[in-house]
């Protein structure tokens, strides 16, 4: 796991992720529970169902992703760091397979990440890469997530803004609350109507 790009070393004090989200691993659900005031969820398609199964849903999902991507990632940022977990049960991978990572050219960067809220014996291997914004590779990755082939993945830009696609939509984070409020105002019909925002 040597020769990694510095921002993929998420534990390091100098990395973008550690600067904005110190104290949690780059797992979307952990970030949501720790930084709920800096978070909003947008559905990938009108029904809010998951995962995506038909072409028309895929087209709408990509349209929404590109709109959020353009709104959240500033133009001077040309790339994002990506963190994608694979869950392991007592050392064995489950429904999410490591070979899915090679198809989107993500490499193993960390192992045996634990979550104290998970059952004993559950760990996560973390795959990562740096991808160009608006690239076909990101489209392939987001599509695989929406089809429930890859777990929720964290994409972080140098300004600290995050899109974390999951199989039904997009969790977004920013340390600037006005950014989250702006997105809520820009895409109000994509928000959940649940009291908890999920």
Image: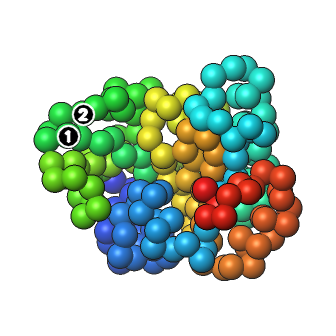
Label 2 secondary element: strand
Horizontal and vertical percent position of residue 71: 78, 59
In depth, the one of 124 and 78 nearer the eye is 124
Residue 117 position, x and y percent, is 29, 62
| Residue where numbered disc 1 is placed | 89
Q: Quadrant of residue 116?
A: bottom left
User: At numbered mark 1, what does the secondary structure look like: helix, strand or loop?
Assistant: strand
Give the camera-side residue of 34 and 80.
34
For this orientation, the residue located farthest to the top is 54
The answer to whether the residues at label 1 and label 2 have Cβ atoms under 8 Å apart is yes
**Observer-nearest residue: 56 or 48?**
48
Residue drawn at (57%, 47%), measured in percent from left and top? 165
Badge 1: few (under 14), some or many (20 or more) residues near its Cα, within 10 Å? few
Q: Which residue is mark 2?
A: 93
Instruction: Tell me if I can see residue 141 in this picture.
Output: no
In the image, taking residue 190 as reference, residue 141 lies left or right, namely left
Whether residue 185 is visible here, answered yes or no, is yes
Colour style of the rendered protein structure:
rainbow
Q: CA distance from mark 1 to mark 2?
A: 6 Å
Q: Is residue 4 left or right of residue 186?
A: left
Residue 146 screen position, x and y as percent:
58, 34
Q: Residue at x 76, y 73 (%)?
A: 181
Q: Is residue 176 above or below residue 133?
A: below
Left or right: where 111 falls relative to 145: left
Splitting the image into 4 quarters, where does residue 107 fall? Answer: top left
Q: Residue at x 74, y 57 (%)?
A: 193
Please identify the quarter of the rendering in which residue 66 is found.
Answer: top right
Kindly identify which numbered label has been placed on residue 105: none
């Amino acid at each position: 796991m040597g020769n990694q790009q510095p921002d993929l070393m998420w534990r390091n004090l100098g990395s973008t992720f550690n600067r904005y989200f110190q104290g949690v691993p780059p797992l979307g659900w952990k970030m949501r529970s720790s930084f709920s005031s800096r978070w909003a969820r947008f559905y990938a398609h009108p029904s809010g169902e998951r995962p995506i199964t038909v072409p028309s849903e895929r087209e709408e999902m990509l349209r929404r992703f590109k709109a959020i991507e353009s709104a959240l990632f500033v133009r001077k940022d040309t790339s994002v760091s990506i963190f994608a977990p694979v869950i392991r049960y007592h050392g064995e991978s489950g429904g999410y397979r490591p070979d899915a990572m090679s198809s989107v050219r993500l490499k193993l960067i960390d192992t045996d990440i634990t979550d104290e809220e998970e059952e004993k014996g559950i760990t996560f291997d973390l795959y990562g890469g740096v991808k160009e914004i608006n690239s076909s590779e990101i489209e392939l990755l987001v599509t695989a997530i929406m089809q429930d082939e890859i777990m929720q993945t964290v994409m972080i830009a140098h300004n600290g803004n995050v899109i974390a696609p999951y199989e039904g939509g997009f969790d977004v984070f920013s340390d600037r609350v006005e950014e989250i409020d702006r997105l809520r105002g820009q895409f109000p019909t994509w928000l959940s109507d649940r009291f908890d925002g999920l």
